[in-house]
Amino acid sequence: MKAPGRTGDGRVGVRTDTTVRRLLSVDEVAEVLGVPVRTLYQWRHKGVGPLGLRVGRHLRYREVDVSGWIDRRAAEEARSRG
């Protein structure tokens, strides 16, 4: 969310929501989804799983991306069933 505000040096600028949320590890996402860690890496390679972010050499996931992916999969399932 963007809101007008003052920068650190007193200039008026645009301030963005900088709330930092905890990132999920591959192990945590695998547990949530009930799939092996290897499956997450395969989905990432194929571009079909939840959006993952590289943080250094580590793969992390934002909760919002995982829950959004689950919601989209559920909607696709509902549409395919009629």
Image (cartoon, rainbow, N blue to C red):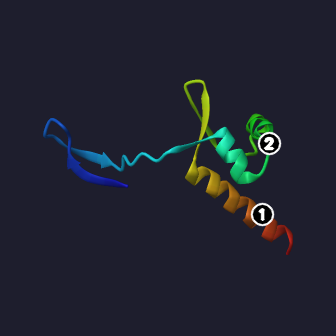
Residue 45: quarter of image: top right
The image shows residue 66 at horizontal and vertical percentages of 64, 51
The image shows residue 48 at horizontal and vertical percentages of 76, 45
Q: Is residue 14 visible?
A: yes
Residue 26: quarter of image: top right
Residue at 23% in and 44% down: 13
Query: N-terminal of the two: label 2 or label 1?
Result: 2
Residue for badge 2: 36
The label on residue 20 is: none
Query: Which quadrant holds the C terminus?
Result: bottom right
Q: Secondary structure at mark 1?
A: helix
Q: CA distance from mark 2 to mark 1?
A: 22 Å
Do callouts 2 and 1 mark residues in contact (Cβ within 8 Å)?
A: no
Residue for badge 1: 76
Residue at 36% in and 50% down: 17
Front residue of 72 and 26:
26
The image shows residue 74 at horizontal and vertical percentages of 74, 64
In this rendering, which labeled residue sits more in front, label 2 or label 1? 2
Work out which residue is located at the far bottom of the displayed protein and give it. 82
Dot 1 surroundings within 10 Å: few (below 14), some, or many (20 or more)? few
